[in-house]
Image (cartoon, grey):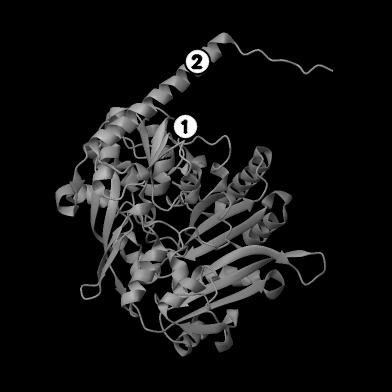
Amino acid sequence: MKSPSFSVPLFLLVLFSFSWATSARTHDSFLQCLSVHSGINARLIYTQNSSSYESVLDLSARNARFSTPTTPRPLVIVTPSNVSHVQATINCSREHDMQIRIRSGGHDYEGLSYVSKVPFVIIDLINMRSIDVDTEKKTAWIQAGATIGELYYRIAEKSTTLAFPAGVCPTVGVGGHFSGGGYGMMTRKFGLAADQIIDAHIVTVDGRILDRNSMGEDLFWAIRGGGGASFGVIVAWKVKLVSVPSTVTVFSVNRTLEENATKLVHKWQSVAEAIDEDLYFRVFLRAVNSSKEGKRTVQASFTSLFLGRIDQLIALMQESFPELGLVKEDCIEMSWIQSILYFPGIPQSESLDVLLNRTGTIRTVTAGIFKAKSDYVTEPIPEIALEGLWQWFYEDESGTLELIFSPYGGIMDEISESETPFPHRAGNLYNIHYAVSWEEEDSSTSQKHINFMRRLYKYMEPYVSKSPRAAYMNYRDLDLGSNNEGNYTSYTQASRWALKYFKNNFNRLIHVKSMVDPQNFFRHEQSVPTLLQG
């Protein structure tokens, strides 16, 4: 039997040929511009014809949902080794109408640091990751291509009692993590990573290099929680370090539904945000095999960092949360830097050098193909609603489903909503991180799991924050809304997603954007638009 043939309309062939030729000309002229104006070594530039192009592109592409044959790819990847290379890339991109994607660690949940639907270039900051720790002044300068694991390692090299309050996953890049807020196991004691920033270097749309003094307080405010990629290319941060005891205590206690997990999680909601700020303990929720053969159940893992010794922790828990039944045998004393290995599940026998491994060997639900969302909870979720939530873990479409409840309170209640663009402060009991992952790469399987996540998110609507239903920007979610592909996005359209991330701070972010990038050169699906756009 003869295979059917399909004819492509002539206008489509002409359109495709024109588009391909236009991209090719853009690519060539962009490369010529770089070679003339930057003095950048050719070995730092990767085109689609480069033998290392694929490996460089994939090295920091953290969500495999955006590493498929149909995923749009950059015409060029530039890996600058100094600020002049960043300046030249911005200037040449503007001159040749190419969008920029800025990649630090590549953990953007929707791939926005390395994917675009229009011709684009990636500025991959992997070669700009020096870290200078000053123990006397308790500060550090960190280039934006460094990971938080590299930062933790460099601090521990010089001190056993200095630390930094940022995230748990060591391969996350500081460029995006800090500029979106950045919380972790010491947030209730010290606040966010963004709250520790005291200076920064940014390259703006006109190629200027600005520090805090020259950029002014409005722009400095905006990049500490408003997403740096909307305003320029942040190339370095200066942060203040925090003091921690030489010995801290950790624990991870598991309880299944058969072991009273429902009542424990319900009680946790009113305990974790009100307990001593030296104690941070979050809850991981996962489906596991039940003690009954062939059955599944839900397990709650209570995981904690306490800035003190075991005896102090046991006394605190017996007073505030005796129902958990924590005993000394559940707890481990260690140094702060050892806790950095403990929480992502790195064996304590591993050398600290593992923190310098940018690719990482940590298996989490957000490693591979996944879809994630976030919520904030302002009133305890009733037990009956938690019981309804457990049923979602048993659905076929749930894949590998994990929820993380991360408490607020402590110093977070004392910082104003408008202190930085990150507004989720007093009044929030905890943040919810939802993630579902799967292994099959076909689009129908992906859509099945994404639809599951959307249904779960809908189920949770009555039990989370309202007007707006708030979300955490570093857990990027394009389901919340997105900008137009072109240069124009109205305030109304952008506010659908932006008010969830920034609340009333969105208005100030727009004013800052309009001052520093009035033509909206730095843009992506959820970048801050300008006032001039309507």
Is 266 above or below relative to 322? above
Front of the two marks 2 and 1: 2
Question: Residue 117: which numbered mark, if any?
Answer: 1
**Foreground pick, 67 / 496:** 67
The furthest residue to the top: 10
**x, y percentage for residue 68?**
58, 40
The furthest residue to the bottom: 311
Left or right side of 115 for 232: left
**Foreground pick, 4 / 56:** 56
**x, y percentage for residue 493?**
41, 33
**Image quarter (top left, top right, bottom left or bottom right) of the C terminus:** top left
Instruction: Name the amino acid type tagged 1.
Output: Lys
Instruction: Name the amino acid type tagged 2.
Output: Leu
Label 1: element kind: loop
How dense is the environment of label 2, judged by Cα within 10 Å: few (below 14), some, or many (20 and up)?
few
Left or right side of 507 for 266: right
Label 2: element kind: helix
**x, y percentage for residue 62?**
51, 51
**Foreground pick, 71 / 196:** 71
Is 513 above or below relative to 284? above
Q: Residue at x 69, y 69 (%)?
A: 257
How dense is the environment of label 1, judged by Cα within 10 Å: few (below 14), some, or many (20 and up)?
few
The furthest residue to the left: 214
Q: Does the image show residue 436?
A: yes
Q: Earlier in the sequence, mark 2 or mark 1?
A: 2
> Dot 2 corresponds to which residue?
15
Q: Residue at x 15, y 49 (%)?
A: 214
**x, y percentage for residue 294?**
82, 64
Q: Does the image show residue 488?
A: no
Distance from the alpha carbon under mark 2 to that under mark 1: 17 Å
